[in-house]
Amino acid sequence: ILPEDADAQNPANRFEKETGVPVAPGLIQMVNGISNANRIRAGKRLRIPTDRMEIVVTRSTYTMRVYLGDLLLRVYQVGIGKDKQHETPLGTFKVIEKQVDPVWYHPEGGIIPANDPRNLLGRYFIKLEHPTFVGFGIHGTKDQPTVGKRSSLGCIRVRDKDMQELFSIVPRKT
């Protein structure tokens, strides 16, 4: 139950501060069947998922599965690295940052602002940490037909509508 002095608009932040367990606001909405975050009020009883979230990308099928504990939440179609030079890496990664309207640091050089038509990242970027790979992540794309194919410069591409949902439900440290 959210106490009267709670930040009713972001129970996820309060929960993480109190427990150390990261949870995304969109996941709280999903689990509680809340379509509008503005309807969350102090004193409202909420279910807060504490199971670990995991994302598994299968390159051969161009799919990304999102799990909450053992429960499969979503399956998304993805685009992956277009060739050997731009291969989507194998390994275990961790979500370290979530960016809205990201600047694109083109891997072949150049900084492309968020609103520039050459910026292919879409509206959301989930930055992944790995000891070897830098600048790697999951992002939307303005080029929707490239999802489901070998098409990216190495990152994982998701349709914009799917990326918006993914961004809202995946907490940092996933």
Image: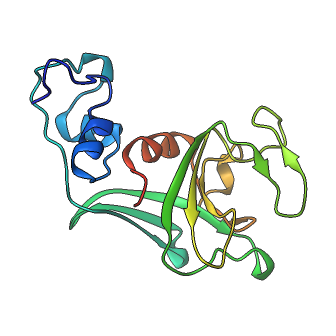
Q: Residue 30 appears at what percent x and percent y?
A: 26, 39
> Against 39, is 81 above or below?
below
Q: Residue 165 appears at what percent x and percent y?
A: 43, 42
Please identify the residue farthest to the right as the structure is shown.
109
Q: Residue at x 14, y 27 (%)?
A: 2
- Indicate the quadrant containing the C terminus: top left, top right, bottom left or bottom right: bottom left
Q: Quadrant of residue 102?
A: top right
Q: Residue at x 13, y 24 (%)?
A: 3
Question: Between 108 and 148, which is closer to the camera in this rendering?
Answer: 108
Count of all numbered marks drawn on residues in the image: 0
Q: Quadrant of residue 56?
A: bottom left
Question: Between 147 and 7, which is closer to the camera in this rendering?
Answer: 7
Please give left or right for residue 46 compared with residue 160 in the image. Answer: left
Question: Between 3 and 127, which is closer to the camera in this rendering?
Answer: 3
Q: Residue at x 74, y 43 (%)?
A: 103
> Against 4, is 89 above or below?
below
> What scheme was used to colour the molecule?
rainbow
Q: Residue 132 appears at what percent x and percent y?
A: 65, 79
**Residue 36 visible at all:** no
Q: Quadrant of residue 50?
A: bottom left
Q: Residue at x 29, y 26 (%)?
A: 35
> Against 47, is 75 above or below?
below
> Against 29, is 103 above or below?
below
- Indicate the quadrant containing the N terminus: top left, top right, bottom left or bottom right: top left
**Residue 93 visible at all:** yes
Please give left or right for residue 124 compared with residue 57 in the image. Answer: right
